[in-house]
Image (cartoon, rainbow, N blue to C red):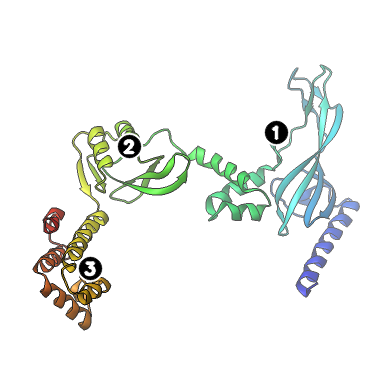
């Protein structure tokens, strides 16, 4: 055993011995007499021990008169006790388990019921403070697995607590702004391999996620929530375009910058591949390796790369014209992709 482990073991043993001694002397009738443990107000501790690396607290509540839920009369008659195991917050960086001696009362009307407790809900195996803590960690932590390992529970339990928090935050409907952006992304849901994200095109904040990218799904969503939408930014997917036109009243459709740039570079690359097939095998292979010089701005090229660019441009007027059109776009000029594509016909 290492020195750190010996020290940690000694500290835990000392804490347990101190707490049990105080309990025997009557100094630990209530938790707040030595410390305020969250969620355990007015709880009597009868025993403290360490079981398999966890702190086990044996607790019970003071006996008080209770109101019968059936006849509403007051009773103090105890029917029996039941031990309930409850997971609680960490104590001295150790997982804590509560063994709650739950009292059941008996009424003259024949009704038997459990006493009221402030730290545990009905039919639960986790304390209220534990549930609150895991909901906060589920939102702020990077993964559900890290929360489960920290709190000593399963990943599915963490996900269920997270879903409760998310359900409270969800609204029944959304109001789309005048300018929206839509795009697909690859997900892992049962609805399909691809989902569709709808965002505010001005603030770039996501608004909603659709379960799939099918035309009917997009059309139905925009018809329901897109009354104020006037401009839609998206790629040139024909399915998206048809859904937007069918759902909205003559919207302005704008190709997003990423796909607009991609079409330009695809057209330029198509021209390069078409002309290099007529060249000598040496030039064809070298241009294939040096094709990135056509994608960069000329100001970013070094002397050798600029020489390569000018050499290959001189070998083909068609390739030179296509590269010049790409340069106009880089300088901020407004050109249409169709102008560049005509060189590929």
Query: At numbered mark 3, what does the secondary structure look like: helix, strand or loop?
Result: loop
**Which quadrant of the view contains residue 55?**
bottom right
Q: Residues within 10 Å of mark 3 (few under 14, many from 20)?
A: few
Q: Nearer the viewer, residue 23 or 263?
A: 263
Pointer 2 or 1: first along the chain: 1
- Farthest right residue in view: 24
The answer to which of marks 3 and 1 sits earlier in the sequence is 1
- Kindly report which numbered mark, 3 or 2, lies closer to the viewer in this rendering: 3
Q: Residue 41 in the image: state x and y as whole percent.
A: 73, 44
**Residue beneath the point at 73% across and 22% down:** 69
As measured in the structure, the alpha-carbon distance from the residue carrying label 3 to the one carrying label 1 is 66 Å
Please tell me whether mark 3 or mark 1 is closer to you in this view: 3
Q: Which residue is mark 3?
A: 295
List x then y, in percent, for residue 39. 69, 45
Vertical position of residue 15 compared to residue 239: above or below: below
**SS for tag 2?**
helix
Point out residue 292 in the picture as x, y percentages from the top left corner: 25, 71
Residue 178 in view here: no
Precedes in sequence: disc 3 or disc 2 = 2
Question: Which class describes the residues within 10 Å of circle 2: few (<14), some (14-19), or many (20+)?
Answer: many
Q: CA distance from mark 3 to mark 2?
A: 35 Å
The quadrant of the image that shows the N terminus is bottom right
| Picture quarter with the C terminus | bottom left
Nearest the camera: 271 or 57?
A: 271
The residue identified by callout 2 is 218
Q: Which label was assigned to residue 237?
A: none
Q: Is residue 130 left or right of residue 319?
A: right
Q: Secondary structure at mark 1?
A: loop
Residue 122 is marked as 1
Q: Is residue 33 left or right of residue 250?
A: right
Q: Is residue 220 above or below residue 340?
A: above
């Amino acid at each position: 055993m290492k020195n750190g482990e010996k020290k940690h073991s000694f500290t835990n043993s000392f804490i347990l011995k101190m707490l049990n001694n105080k309990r025997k002397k009557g100094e630990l009738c209530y938790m707040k007499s030595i410390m305020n443990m969250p969620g355990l107000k007015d709880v009597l501790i009868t025993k403290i021990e360490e079981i398999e690396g966890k702190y086990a607290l044996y607790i019970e509540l003071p006996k008080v008169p209770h109101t019968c839920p059936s006849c509403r009369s007051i009773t103090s008659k105890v029917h029996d006790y039941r031990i309930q195991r409850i997971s609680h917050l960490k104590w001295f960086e150790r997982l804590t388990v509560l063994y709650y001696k739950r009292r059941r009362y008996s009424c003259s009307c024949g009704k038997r019921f459990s006493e009221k407790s402030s730290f545990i809900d009905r039919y639960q195996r986790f304390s209220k403070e534990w549930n609150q803590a895991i909901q906060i960690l589920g939102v702020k932590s990077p993964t559900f697995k890290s929360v489960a390992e920290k709190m000593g529970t399963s990943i599915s339990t963490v996900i269920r607590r997270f879903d409760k928090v998310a359900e409270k935050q969800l609204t029944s409907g959304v109001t789309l702004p005048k300018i929206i952006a839509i795009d697909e992304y690859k997900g892992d849901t049962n609805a399909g391999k691809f989902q569709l994200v709808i965002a505010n095109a001005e603030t770039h904040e996501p608004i909603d996620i659709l379960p799939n990218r099918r035309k009917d799904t997009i059309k139905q969503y925009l018809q329901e929530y897109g009354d104020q939408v006037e401009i839609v930014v998206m790629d040139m997917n024909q399915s998206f375009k048809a859904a937007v036109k069918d759902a909205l009243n003559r919207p302005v459709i704008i190709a997003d910058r990423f796909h607009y740039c991609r079409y330009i570079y695809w057209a330029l690359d198509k021209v390069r591949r078409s002309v290099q097939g007529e060249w000598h095998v040496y030039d064809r292979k070298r241009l294939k390796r040096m094709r990135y010089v056509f994608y960069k701005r000329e100001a970013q090229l070094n002397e050798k790369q600029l020489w390569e660019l000018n050499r290959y441009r001189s070998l083909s007027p068609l390739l030179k014209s296509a590269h010049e059109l790409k340069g106009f776009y880089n300088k901020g000029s407004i050109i249409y992709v169709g102008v560049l594509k005509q060189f590929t016909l």
